[in-house]
Amino acid sequence: MAKIIDGKAISKQIREEIAAETAEFAKNSGFKPGLAVIIVGEDPASQVYVRNKRKACDEVGFYSESYELPAETTQEELETLVDKLNNDDKIHGILVQLPLPKHLDETRVLLKINPEKDVDAFHPYNVGKIMIGDYSFLPCTPAGVMALIERSEIDVCGKKCVVIGRSNIVGKPMAMLLLHSHGTVTICHSRTQNLASICKEADILVAAIGKADFVGADMIKEGAVVIDVGMNRKADGKLTGDVNFAEAEPLASYITPVPGGVGPMTITMLMQNTLTAAKNKVK
Ligand code: GUN
């Protein structure tokens, strides 16, 4: 029987800490941390995220702006808005919701964001800083996973860690953060041979593949910590992870549920990064 890592409860606790720090910061500095969120087009999932981000900002006492731009927005219009926000003293963090519509060049947009306001840590400058272990911002989802691991008092040092997935947003930075915590890290992906046997050796298994119920009993070592980053919609509209929870739970020592595991942590870490950006500005 695994211990369930309650992402909702841990997230609530961290947001309360951020709210208290924000109140103290605002009292001393005379201004609130400010976050701008840009969304282009009408992807319903992205619209939900943006709404949740705005709510989270209100909850912790931040100033926030949201820009919901039409799908036909041009590269130039988007970059002009990013530039305006780069030069806006009320805004300390800028987030451009991904994916962008196909006609827009994501890399060029991310390069436009001032790295000091890059609260997603997607700018190549911040990605490079993560690689060398010297960073102001951590990408929100991997940072959320590390916070869940730390607050559950799970020791990563010397452990075999396997990350399934090699995306720039999750897999790659996740592997780097586990490495910085002295884990012995393997990254697996769609071309990996003997995937199940590699996963079955993991003390800490992080699934970030984007395929519902992909990780089954044959991939989990008894006593492993299983972290599920997946968020997949089933035909009935219900949210499900990358891990087959019913099969994994009896084997794991700790496991994150979906929903209520990693999901709530992502926005919480965004709040953390925005507060850090505001504090860095004062420094
Ligand atoms: N789309 C899915 N996850 C993320 C994220 O963490 N940040 C941004 N900007 N877009 C996303």
Image: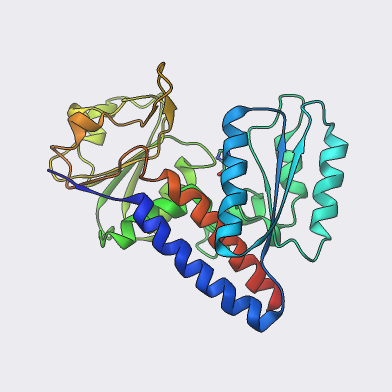
Which residue appears at 60% of the width and 66% of the height?
275
Which residue appears at 64% of the width and 63% of the height?
62
Residue 248 x/y as whole percent: 20, 34
**Viewer-nearest residue: 68 or 244:** 68
Q: Is residue 68 left or right of residue 79?
A: left
Q: Is residue 158 left or right of residue 104?
A: left
**Viewer-nearest residue: 63 or 5:** 63
Quarter of the rendering containing residue 64: bottom right
Residue 24 x/y as whole percent: 57, 79
Q: Quadrant of the N terminus?
A: top left
Which residue appears at 82% of the width and 40% of the height?
78
Q: Is residue 76 above or below residue 282?
A: above
Q: How is the image coloured?
A: rainbow
**Viewer-nearest residue: 96 or 237:** 237
Q: How many marks?
A: 0
Q: Quadrant of ligand 1?
A: top right
Q: Is residue 117 left or right of residue 151?
A: right
Q: Quadrant of the C terminus?
A: bottom right
The answer to whether residue 129 is visible is: no
Judged from this view, the residue extending furthest toward the bottom is 28
Residue 48 x/y as whole percent: 57, 37
Residue 135 x/y as whole percent: 56, 63
Judged from this view, the residue extending furthest toward the top is 235
